[in-house]
């Protein structure tokens, strides 16, 4: 292979890598303040919510989720338990659907309404227009969780627990432990875990 072809190939690879980095938003760091707290998002009941209005005395749990991801479906039966735990500790919970690129492929508001009704969601499920909220958070997966304290500072981000496929096999209850520790004024450990799920379908820029 000629040097010119090698150089061209390396240049193309570099462009692809740089493009991948450009498309990967930076995730909120622990201690960061919640972004875009006054942006309204509509839920499956037609009600408008903001991060600020959804927060309770001790904070807010934001969960990026969707209707079609197999990982969401594996964890989904635990969503209401998480919402109940949050409510017990005066923490609000808001589920956000960021899959703007496939609204016509299972992620529309109509699909969200059907999902929320079928699963009996006991928390608001809102649509993220243009995936702007997911971009601001640096969310990359569904599900992807972000827990904020009463000052709306990020104290935990990542997965629900360590056993997405089998609820009976859970060893580490990450978000439950974080909620309990935050409510009791104790240190949260770990503060970051790996989000396992489907890639969020961002709109083309």
Image (tube, helix red, strand yellow):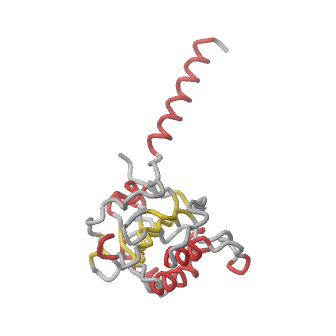
In the depicted structure, whether residue 191 falls above or below residue 61: above
- Residue 138 location (% of width, % of height): 44, 54
Of residues 54 and 29, which is closer to you in this image? 29
Q: Residue at x 49, y 40 (%)?
A: 21
- Residue 71 location (% of width, % of height): 60, 68
Of residues 187 and 87, which is closer to you in this image? 187
Question: In this image, 26 relative to 10: left or right?
Answer: left
Question: In this image, 70 relative to 129: left or right?
Answer: right
In the depicted structure, whether residue 24 falls above or below residue 1: below
- Residue 201 location (% of width, % of height): 46, 57
Q: Residue at x 35, y 75 (%)?
A: 55
Question: In this image, 162 relative to 102: left or right?
Answer: right
- Residue 106 location (% of width, % of height): 45, 69
Q: Residue at x 29, y 71 (%)?
A: 50
Q: Residue at x 30, y 71 (%)?
A: 52
Marker count (numbered): 0
Quadrant where the image shows the N terminus: top right
Of residues 125 and 81, which is closer to you in this image? 81
Question: In this image, 74 relative to 34: left or right?
Answer: right
| Residue most extreme to the top | 3
Residue 148 location, quadrant: bottom left
């Amino acid at each position: 292979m000629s040097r010119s072809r090698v150089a061209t190939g390396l240049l193309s690879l570099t462009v692809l890598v740089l493009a991948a980095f450009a498309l990967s938003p930076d995730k909120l760091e622990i201690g960061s303040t919640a972004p875009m707290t006054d942006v309204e998002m509509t839920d499956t009941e037609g009600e408008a919510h903001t991060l600020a209005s959804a927060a309770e005395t001790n904070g807010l749990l934001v969960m990026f989720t969707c209707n079609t991801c197999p990982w969401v479906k594996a964890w989904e039966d635990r969503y209401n338990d998480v919402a109940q735990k949050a409510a017990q500790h005066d923490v609000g919970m808001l589920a956000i659907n960021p899959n703007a690129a496939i609204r016509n492929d299972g992620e529309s508001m109509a699909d969200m309404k059907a999902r929320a009704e079928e699963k009996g969601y006991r928390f608001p499920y809102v649509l993220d227009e243009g995936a702007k909220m997911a971009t601001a958070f640096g969310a990359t997966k569904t599900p992807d969780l972000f827990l904020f304290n009463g000052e709306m500072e990020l104290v935990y981000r990542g997965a629900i627990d360590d056993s997405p496929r089998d609820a009976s096999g859970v060893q580490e209850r990450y978000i439950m432990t974080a909620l309990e520790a935050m409510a009791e004024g104790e240190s949260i450990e770990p503060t970051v875990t790996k989000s396992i799920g489907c890639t969020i379908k961002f709109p083309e820029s």
